[in-house]
Amino acid sequence: MSNIGSYEERIRDFSWSISEKELGYNPGGIINIGWLCSDRICELGKAQKTGLIWENASGVVKKFTYNDIRLASNTIGQFLRDLGIKPEDRICLFMDKIPELYLGFLGILKIGAIAQPLFSAFGDESLFIRLENAWTRAIITQKKHLPKIRKILDKMPFLEFIIIVDQDPLKPLQSREIAFDLKNIPKVEVFEICPTRAESPSVLHYTSGTTGQPKGVKHVHYSIISQYLTSKWVLDLQDDDIYWCTADPGWVTGTSYGIIGAFSNGVTQCVLDAGFSAESWYRFIEKYRITMWYSAPTAIRSLMKAGDEIINKFDLSSLRHLASVGEPLNPEAVIWSEKVFGKPFLDTYWQTETGSIMISNYPGMKIKPGSMGKPFPGITATVVSPDTYESFDVPGKIGLIALKPGWPSMMRMYWNNEETYKNKFRNGWYLPGDRSSIDTDGYFWFVGRDDDVINTGGHLVSPFEVESALLEHPAVAESAVVSKPDFVNMEVVKAFVSLKPGYQPSKELDLEIMNFVRKKLSPLAMPQEIEFMDSLPKTRSGKIMRRILHAREWGEEVGDTSTLEDDDK
Ligand code: WT7
């Protein structure tokens, strides 16, 4: 029996107080995610239950009971507090998927500070932009990432502490650096948890838009009310589940469902801190007898590509329930998973700003492969006209996805950017920036984004950020960045570049520019292809027209080109 039971019944008598009651939250009272994810689970009698199983690429395994998680997060919290970290200070987590990332996240929340997770593959420029925007006071990291931090240190007077979790005791520390060794520090048994309230800030995730710098999405402790219940009803987390969320906590899936949803439900979750290969993923499922698996379309397509024979080498019979998020899940992938795992991947739709699953397929509900499913109970979702922002009442008509604000895990603000925040609302609706239609049965069918943001392998990349990075290369005069189709990643980054006088296109320059972007921003933002042009198509006012280049890549009609520079003649 699934947790949700009947979707229709849940819709009928839904109230968020269901989640509040289960978590023991009294409206107006104290609510702390760090406490709910560790101390409370211990109080429920699961102190000795394994909460986290971690394995890395070399096969090293570490296990933590809920009591270990409670003590480790206390200890990290105390360490930060002793440094003088105060509630609402921003503390960046800049680490691979190591245990300290998960435990540190909870420790930061326990002292009421704001956790700012950043993807550890970010280059120095991506890192700097986000730390500067948040005025981050401390960063917790590994020694392998220090060079990137040291490079930008002079530009960051606000960053007081660089906490290294794997410092070699014999190596000297540089300015602002401090060593923290979870293994050897005395564990803090009794800890005073910051009495945060529903609206106390908790997590700051950065997300990319079409224009401008990345935006810091501010969440609050009350978000757990959504994350707990969606984990229970959509991911169907049950007491004996062995759960694997493949996302990195540098991104919202990895925190909302890779930390908060998992631990607040008291399940055992597994983390594989290693690169992707079909073989190692299947081996991981077999070894730990994974029952619930939350992953992403790009990974699923990569597994499809690896072929079906390899699956027969493993015993994957433990799998009970599968779900996916981050990009369109094509019907072929749903049908394939049903064939090879005996279960379909259930698509779920949401975004950094929404904090939790908004539209989804539910255990027991009829699945239409290719559809994102229906709104979570308590979520009012529709599609609206892009002109009037009135809800369309016509099945099949494509409009903007619109959500009625007010669910617990909705973002509360873009950090220091009220204008952009306000701009996300129209006619009483929150607009996530995606297009969809709704069929006669109320199922949502994703169509595409309503902006130029590139979704590559489930990661949003801003063309503006990549263009800006390209312009910093000495050879580049102009740049325009668009997506191009790709079987596995759905979209990849493609750059059009015109060169400064004295530079000639060449294979070497091509690679050099690609690497330049990879180091500055990240491997995700690195163009997979660079096309050199004498000059880029522009409007009369000199604005580069990405739309034309995009249409060319996707084999679409170019549309209205009347404002093109070349038409001036
Ligand atoms: C954007 C949000 C939500 C966690 C990971 C991404 C796209 C998300 C789906 C889906 C089609 C999807 C949307 C959305 N997206 N889920 N099931 N089908 N597209 O979070 O980085 O904030 O990206 O990803 O465009 O707005 P994010």
Image (spheres, grey):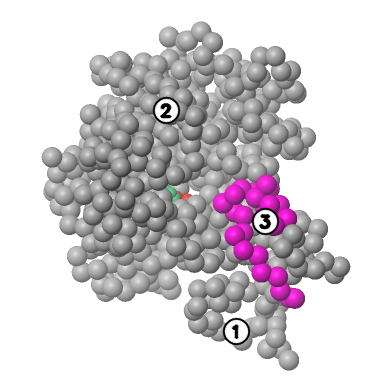
Gap in Å between the C-alphas at discs 1 and 3?
A: 30 Å
Residue placed at 44% from the left, 62% from the top? 487
Q: Secondary structure at mark 2?
A: strand
Earlier in the chain: of badge 3 and badge 2, it is: 2
Q: Mark 1 is on which residue type?
A: Thr
Assess disc 1: are there few (<14), some (14-19) or many (≥20) residues with their C-alpha within 10 Å of its C-alpha: some
- Residue bounds of the magenta highlight: 511-535
Q: Is residue 475 above or below residue 295?
A: below
Identify residue for label 3.
514
Q: Secondary structure at mark 1?
A: loop
Q: Mark 2 is on which residue type?
A: Trp
Identify residue for label 1.
561
Q: Secondary structure at mark 3?
A: helix
Q: Which mark lies nearer to you, 1 or 2?
A: 2
* Label of residue 153 in the image: none
* Label of residue 54 in the image: 2
